[in-house]
Each structure stands twice: as C-alpha cells, then as structure tokens.
Image (cartoon, rainbow, N blue to C red):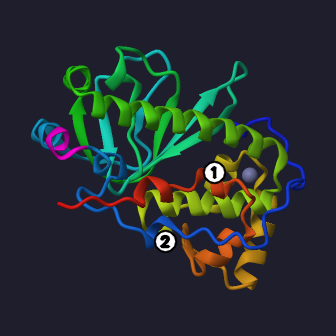
Amino acid sequence: MRQAHMYRTTTRTAAQPANFKAASALDTKVARTGNGLLDRLEKADLRQLLARSERVKLQRGDTVARPGEDIPFVDFPVGAAVSHFQILKDGKTVEIAMTGREGALGIPAALRQGVSKEFSEVLVGGEAYRVDASFLRGLAERSPGLRNVFFGYFNECLERVSRRVICNNYHSVEERLCLWLMLVRDRCGIDSLPFTQEQVSFFLGVHRPSVTLAMQELRKKGVVDYSRGTVHIKNAPDLIERSCSCYASLSVNEANAAPLAV
Ligand SMILES: [Zn+2]
C-alpha cells in the first residue's frame, strides 16, 4: 500500500473565468484511429506505423513503466487511462500526469533511446496500439513530420506536468477531485469510472474523509453518483465548472479537435 504524497492543498487563488465553458473530449472526435496523437500524423506515416503495430489490452492495475527501466515499445491508448507517478525518497508517491486516448506512453523512446523516469500504472483498463520503440525511432529519423508531432506532444506533456505540480500545491480538494474525474473521463471516454473513494483519495494524495465530504456534496448537487466501487459522472459541464482553472491546461480537447479525413 503506497502512502499518500506530502503535497498540501489550499484554497484556490486564481479565479476561473466566469465564461469558461471548456467542452469535454467526449464531445469531440478521435477521427481515424481512436487515438488523438496518431490522428495528427500524416497518412503515409500513420500507415507505416499501424502496419507494425499490434493491438494490446492494458489491464487495470498493471505497472507499465518503472523508473530506470528500458522503454521497449510505445503504446497509443484508445480506451485505457494510465497514471504516472514520481516516487519520493521516503517511498511516498505523487501523480504528475495522466495519459489516455489523446497521447502515448513512452514517447521519449520514439525520439531517442532511453529509460523511464517514472512509475506508470493503468488506471482504467482498455486497448492500445503497441509499436516497437526502435522501429519508431527509425521512422522518426526518416520523417520530419512525424518527428515534429512527437516533439510537440512531448513538450505538451512537460507543460502538463508543471501544471499538475502547481495544482497539487495550491488548489482545493473539491476542485482537484472534479478536475481529476474529468481528466480520467476525457482520457478513456467513459462516464462510469471504476474507483472507490479510497483509491480516489490515493490518486489525489489526500485523506479519504476529505474526498468523502467532497463526493457527498457533488452527489447532493446531482453532479456525480457512486456505488460499489464506481463513480458515475452525471453532469460533466457542471463538473468542469467546479474544477480548478487547471482543466483549461490539462484538457485533451486540442489534441482531439482536429480530425483528419480518412
Ligand atoms: Zn488545479
């Protein structure tokens, strides 16, 4: 059993714009493949990549990366969501990022040979396209377009990690709970999320009673419901309104908002 991380939470200091109405990625299209990053690729690159891919199932709770381990392949999820952690010296962990159908796992390995710097665990089970990392490196060397897409995505990931660090330190439990539920929903495309309150409190790095209180309030307002280890999102727009301003930075809408013709 991991310990909750040591980040404290405080009330939100930056007000969310009153007219902020970000849509959910559920309302957008992942046009060709079901994965937003693959959908950004030029047709010829995508064809080569898919020809060398296999469809795999990522099982909930599986560890897909550990710090210091080689990254042998890159996964492009189409239904799974994966949580990325850093492990602190005292054994505590903190979630720094989440990946789903908007992106890829192990993208640094597609740009240069390397090892994982984080611990990654499957939050919600689902399928992914899996491609050998060395093949992708070769493809990236030959295709500037593919290389640019992957570098662009890598930079987006770094920006999202920075935002999560700020969020973990400065935003309230209720705001972060709403945000976190929306991040999972956007990344795996489902409204019923398989988490107990204990698990949610772990991912948020806060004590369970504060999550229970926030959940009760959300249920009273008709935003979510929960039963038997499942959180049901009933009103996503309201959940976004109740999230901290970080949703605008961590939403995956932009990644999925430019569907290409088949
Ligand atoms: Zn935040």
In the orientation shown, which residue stands out farthest toward the left? Answer: 51
Residue type of the residue flagged with mark 1 = Ser
Whether residue 20 sits left or right of residue 258 in the image: it is right
Relative vertical location of residue 78 with respect to residue 227 in this rendering, above or below: above
Mark 1 C-beta closer than 8 Å to ligand 1: no
Q: Quadrant of residue 69?
A: top left
Residue type of the residue flagged with mark 2 = Ser
Q: Residue at x 25, y 19 (%)?
A: 141
Q: Residue at x 70, y 30 (%)?
A: 92
In the orientation shown, which residue stands out farthest toward the front? Answer: 144
Sequence-wise, the earlier of marks 2 and 1 is 2
Relative vertical location of residue 164 with respect to residue 186 in this rendering, above or below: above
Magenta stretch: includes residue 2: no
Asked whether residue 95 appears in the rendered view, the answer is yes
Asked whether residue 106 appears in the rendered view, the answer is no
Q: Quadrant of residue 28?
A: bottom left
Q: Which residues are magenta?
A: 42-46
Residue at numbered disc 2: 192
Query: Which-is-in-front pick, marks 2 and 1?
Result: 1
Secondary structure character of the magenta stretch overall = helix
Q: Quadrant of the C terminus?
A: bottom left
- Of helix, strand and loop, which one carries label 2? strand
Whether residue 251 sits left or right of residue 245 in the image: it is left
Residue 81: image x %, image y %?
A: 44, 51
Magenta stretch: includes residue 43: yes
Q: Quadrant of the N terminus?
A: top right
Residue at numbered disc 1: 249
Marks 2/1: CA–CA distance = 23 Å
